[in-house]
Image (cartoon, rainbow, N blue to C red):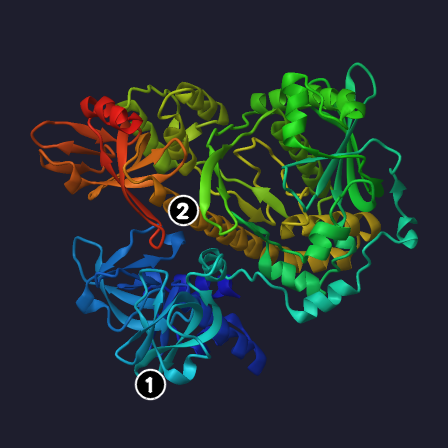
Amino acid sequence: MEEQILKLLRDKKNTSLTSIEINDFLGFKGIGEYAELEKVLDKLCQEGKIYYSEKKKRYTPIENTNFKTGKLIVNPKGYGFVILNPEFNEEDIYISGTNLLDGRNNDTVVVELTGKNSREGRIIRILKRDDSILVGLLYEEKGLYFVKPDKGEYKDLPIPKESLKGAVPGHKVLVKPNNIGKEYVGEIIKIIGHKNDVGVDILSFVYQYEFDPTFSDEVISAVESIPSEVLESEYADREDLRNETIFTIDGDDTKDIDDAISIKKLSNDVYELGVHIADVSHYVKKDEIIDKDAYERGTSVYLVDRVIPMLPHKLSNGICSLNPNVDRLALSCVMNINSKGYVIKYKIFKSVIKSKKQMTYTCVNDILENNKVPEGYEPFVNDLKLMNELSNILRKKMVNHGYLEFDRPEAKILVDDACHPTEIKLREQRTGEKLIENFMIAANETVAGYIEDMKVPGIYRVHDKPNKEKLEIFLKFLNRKGYNIKADINKFKNTDYQRMLKLFKGKPEEVILSTFAIQTMSKAKYSDVNIGHYGIASKRYAHFTSPIRRYPDLTLHRLVKEYTEHNNSKTVSYWQSRLFDISIQSSKKEQDAIDCERDVEKMKKAEYMESHIGEIYHGVISGVTDFGFFVELDNTVEGLVRLDSLGGDYYVYNRDLSAITGKNSKRMYMYGDSVTVEVIAANKETSQVDFNLVKEDNYAKKEKEIEN
């Protein structure tokens, strides 16, 4: 219906239509269809695709007006910007404080363009008030109560005494904004805890991104009815692999184990790789209460000191987890792979397995890299070495196809019992980690191919081609940095990226330039339409291997089983109507989880640096603005060198060069440059770290002072 309405309005050039006229032109009949039409018209207005004139009671395509519809972002300094619908690919519209009407942050608004040669406007209508639940700190001032939202772009909310719900100043709370007449007040709906209580700092981010660390009574009750052990009756229609040598490899502290692996050498040219994934869908039934809750969560969230699981622990760490020496139900993908890394035959089937060993990356790496065999691993050494042989073959094939290896270090923040950070280490992707990654990619590609070859609805992990404009900016920047990249911007291939990444390898700016390269690319997401995966260089890719912690994987398991057992029109019709929504929801919750994990890490890094004021670090400029430049240290902590701290010259920001330049000295600080800094401030509350630049000639002197 949306497409029909838009086509009709765009065909009627220079003409606006009433809802009744639209109804008649489209031939809708009856009250039900007219009511649905009005709902769709409201939706199109809120999305900024059409404009409704209250005065004339008529609808017009937004591109035929001087109005735009978008989301208002208010700066704490009193002005704002309207972010337009992404499909129009237009710049944001600046709104001065006098033209905000009574718009508030995240409101959906109609803005009229006022600037002749610039993107300025004034808000003429509030289409939808933002009623997002906020996280903030309750405080008292002159007998009145307010919540200061953690998000700085929101104004403090007055809280009527009757809406306190037992909260006292110092509590972190969830607050719902409400309109009462012309007043904008808040109602406390949950007390998270006192701001100084252990773990409340992290919980504040969890709630801010709308993840719930607890499960409802209904979900817990449903979980209680699920057995803790595999029942004899559940073996009947499954292939019994309990006597096979199958084991798991994970991190030292992993408790939710999705995947297990097995290996055989069938001939000089053929390996048999088994990837056995927890059959979560056997226990989490489609459209029942546990499934509906998992759909809303979308993913597990892995934070510094805890996991917010998608499924309750009885499932995620218990009956679904492929724990050692116990029977577990699985969905197995067994592939015959030749010596060039190609899958020449495969079988996907329901199975029952018994993992022979819960291995860790640490121990596996000792075997594969140092030839040291930890106690208890002796029976598995040959299998591990055969797996590594196949892993290297698979990785070589992947790279030849254009697989992009971005060496972006990730931080592992260690905390004490009070959740105070004590150390920041870098996660390493060594031989064992790569082995599991290579095997999981092989299984994911195989299952995606199985679904696509059947020509039935599927859910895919897709990654579009790079953004041409961003790529062009990046290549120009690299030329200024002395990297001469010769490639056709219109046909920039994976191999061009590979060649570029090799040029950075081992350089001080490698991490930052690789990050810039990543930013030229689209974001990977879930979709019911397969467009391939650019970064993995795969034409058919899906997520199959983590159903305990990702809803799309759980969905793919259901697709495989249902299409295999009863591929009929009813099954196809059901999934056709569901997969688009599942893809959108899964992509959104994945991004929420990434943002939550990033914000928690940023906060904990700032807390860590509070104990390191005055210390000297080497770093690389990771961002340049008109007020200074950001520096990323080797431990991944990022902080700001303010422009006014440089002194001795007047510095000018050059957006095109991603640099600031001294007007007199011509000294330039450019994105990717190596610098030495001193930590001068850190604030856990704001998650900010501040640096001062250390002149190279003063560096040795400062280091000597620290040593003494």
- Identify the image quadrant of residue 217: bottom right
Structural crowding at the residue carrying mark 2, measured as other residues with C-alpha within 10 Å and reported as few (<14), some (14–19) or many (≥20)? many
Residue at 25%, 34% (x, y): give it: 658
Q: Is residue 127 above or below residue 511?
A: below
Q: Where is residue 119 in the image (x, y as percent from the top left)?
A: 22, 55
Disc 1, SS: loop
Q: In the drawing, does residue 20 fall left or right of residue 353?
A: left
Q: Label 2 sits on what residue type? A: Lys
Q: Where is residue 525 in the image (x, y as percent from the top left)?
A: 54, 46
- Identify the image quadrant of residue 11: bottom left
Structural crowding at the residue carrying mark 1, measured as other residues with C-alpha within 10 Å and reported as few (<14), some (14–19) or many (≥20)? few
Q: Residues at badges 1 and 2 in contact (C-beta under 8 Å)?
A: no
Q: In this view, does 189 lie above or below 552?
A: below
Q: Which mark is residue 181?
A: 1
- Look at mark 2 in the image and give the residue it sits on: 602
Identify which residue, 168 or 355, lies in the foreground.
168
Q: In the drawing, does residue 98 fall left or right of residue 678?
A: left
Q: Where is residue 653 in the image (x, y as percent from the top left)?
A: 18, 38
Residue at 74%, 42% (x, y): give it: 277
Q: Label 1 sits on what residue type? A: Gly
Residue at 70%, 22% (x, y): give it: 390
Q: Which mark is residue 537?
A: none
Is label 1 or label 2 in front?
2
Disc 2, SS: helix
Q: In the drawing, does residue 486 fall left or right of residue 241?
A: left
| Residue 457 in sight from this viewpoint | no
